[in-house]
Amino acid sequence: MLTLIKNAQLVNEGRIYKADVLIENKTIKQIDAKINIEVDQIIDAEGLHLLPGVIDDQVHFREPGLTHKANIYTESKAAIAGGITSFMEMPNTNPQALTQELLEDKYKIAAENSIANYSFFMGASNDNLEEVLKTDPKTVAAVKIFMGSSTGNMLVDNKNVLEEIFSKSSMLIAVHCEDEETIQENITKAKEQYGEEVPVSEHPNIRSAEACFKSSSMAVELAKKHNTRLHVFHLSTEKEISLFDNTLPLAEKRITAEVCIHHLWFDSRDYAKKGTLIKWNPAVKKESDKDALFQALLDGKLDVIATDHAPHTLEEKSNTYFNAPSGGPLVQHALPAMLSFVNQEKISLEKVVEKMCHNPAICFMVENRGFIREGYFADLVLVDLNKPWEVNKDNILYKCGWSPFEGETFSAKITHTFVNGHLVYENGCFDETQKGMRLTFDR
């Protein structure tokens, strides 16, 4: 199968330039100013920009066990419509991915159902070190440690266990950092003031900057002590930025960090309107935190933009503060949100591609993805930067059926998404005849 994308503006490796791209079966065969050969399919991309497929290193697709909220099929479909061609999914499903066998069960589900490329994290707990150390670095994204209360019994709070994992694991370790003791103290204070009717606006005070910094600084300290390859998920505070630097090229960094869409878009003022719909862990915090995170992203202290896509039903979210779960759906709207920032001249298109496509591939050492290069898998996204559209119930693809962006008008639209050379999405229509592939890693 030969597919030719003509007249596109390629956005790749810090440049924007016009070129044709020839796809042969699953991979990019040729990139040139003009390609004129007989092919099976031609896409005229005049007026469109061609990006590498986004690699989202942090999603919760809820399968197995929590499929009333979402599943791998529905959420991979929403991701594809949002220009995300590869995802890495978290271990806090039911059952949790705490053994190699349970981890492989998730891969089997994805092989049958995912239309995007996929990988899964091996979960760590206080008592599964032996299983963690069996993880294959070539075929599994990383080991995930919840250093906070986000997922109940997956909390790793035993310092000796953390020392063991950081000192013995050859894998990249990815962490969610919030200090449980600090959070519980803050809950007690909030209840003393409000009783059980704590307003959601207290969320950033309960899951505070201090709770985040105390945990993330411990993770960084452990990584430096043992020379562990560490990736810190979803930075949410200005305070934590000081833990990271931009003095080395990304490929040489041993400690990297990410920021999520919601921490760049929302701030504490939005609780008044959005309420529990923007209740995430870690919490959306002050405007000054949001602004500092954005600047750290531009400065290179924060390496990756991800979603932490974590859907719940609207019924579950429409609850009181303590009873509403944390998390929200984001994969369909993450790239459009960042393209709106491009339109507002807050960030360049090249920088968005760097943080959402190139850098996840570099951080996780993903093989042959994340760039528009000859010989690489043809994971590609065409976007129209001048096609405004409004998020509403009729165009939301998440199984949960809602989005924190409802009513928002984005300035740019994804028009085509290719996964492994297959045109899976075109202007709202899907061709699901081919499934995604399991990601592999060059390590």
Image: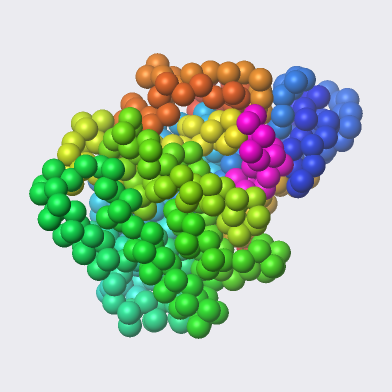
> Residue 296 occupies which quadrant of the picture?
bottom right
Q: Taking 388 as reference, is 8 left or right?
A: right
* Image spot of residue 89 (x, y percent): 42, 50
- Residue at (25, 51) in percent of width and height: 94
Query: Which segment did they paint magenta?
Result: 342-357
* Image spot of residue 374 (x, y percent): 78, 45
Does residue 339 show up? no
Q: Is residue 150 above or below residue 44?
A: below
> 191 or 416, which is in the foreground?
191
Q: Taking 397 as reference, is 369 left or right?
A: right
Q: Taking 13 as reference, is 198 left or right?
A: left
Image quarter (top left, top right, bottom left or bottom right) of the C terminus: bottom right
Does residue 180 show up? yes
Q: Is residue 276 magenta?
A: no
Q: Is residue 356 magenta?
A: yes
> Residue 423 occupies which quadrant of the picture?
top right
Q: Is residue 398 above or below residue 116?
A: above
Q: Taking 285 as reference, is 384 left or right?
A: right
Q: Is residue 82 above or below residue 117?
A: above
> 191 or 167, which is in the foreground?
191
